[in-house]
Amino acid sequence: MNTSLANSARMAWAALRMLLVLTVVTGIVYPVVVTGVGQAAFHAKANGSIVKTDGKEVGSKLIGQSWNINGTDRPDPKWFQPRPSNSGYDPLSTGSSQLGASDPTLVKNVKAAKQQVASFNDVPESKVPADAVTGSASAIDPDISPEYADIQVQRVATANGLSVAQVQKLVKDHTTGRTLGFLGESHVNVLELNLALRQLAEQ
């Protein structure tokens, strides 16, 4: 009986020591090392890829945001518009609408959105790409397709008093191709594009 009790005590002590060691290694050492490497080698990305203009934080390259007329829910014609967001671009409330492709509500919403986008940009509905009327899985996608950027060029140029050629060049300069040439799709970061647009319009 005493031997059995002693063995149990040794096993309990060994388990406790293992718990303490693993707690220190995985709960303290590992996070500190990973955080240190991230801050040293990938400082901007580790801190959210924050974009600053004139010393002020204006957003993140990783999180989409609205570009509406101040104080309204109407898109501002001066700016390139992002993908629609089910969460209102709230990074604390991400997620899609969870509606299936054949859901009548989704079909109705997409049809209405396509008409709105076509009218807003003065293009035929056939020119409206899918990402202009459907949200991403996260609802805060910061990027749009080059096709969606292209149908906005004329409107943006007119609203800012710029030539179409100038705005087209901005889109081209801010279009990122597929990773390694075959992964993902070409895309345009809306925040970076609009900041470049503002700089050009202020010249």
Image (spheres, rainbow, N blue to C red):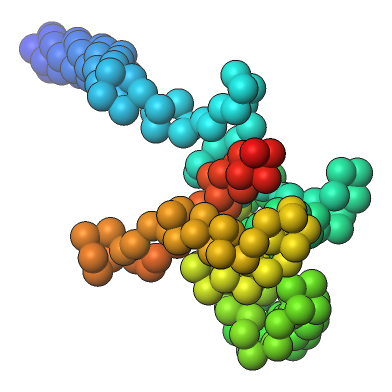
Q: Nearer the viewer, residue 14 or 189?
A: 189
Quadrant where the C terminus is found in the figure: top right
Looking at the image, the residue that sits furthest to the right is 71
Q: Is residue 174 above or below residue 124?
A: above
Q: Nearer the viewer, residue 159 or 162?
A: 162
Q: Nearer the viewer, residue 117 or 17?
A: 117
The tally of labels here is 0
Looking at the image, which residue is at 72% across and 50% down? Answer: 66
Q: Quadrant of residue 172?
A: bottom left
Residue 170 placed where, x, y %? 52, 55
Residue 20 placed where, x, y %? 26, 12
Q: Is residue 49 above or below residue 33?
A: below
Residue 47 placed where, x, y %? 45, 26
Looking at the image, the residue that sits furthest to the left is 3
- The answer to whether any part of residue 63 appears in the image is no
Looking at the image, which residue is at 64% across and 32% down? Answer: 58
Looking at the image, which residue is at 11% across and 15% down? Answer: 7
Quadrant where the N terminus is found in the figure: top left
Left or right of 102 on screen, residue 61: left
- The answer to whether any part of residue 179 appears in the image is yes
Q: Nearer the viewer, residue 103 or 172?
A: 172
Looking at the image, which residue is at 58% across and 59% down? Answer: 167
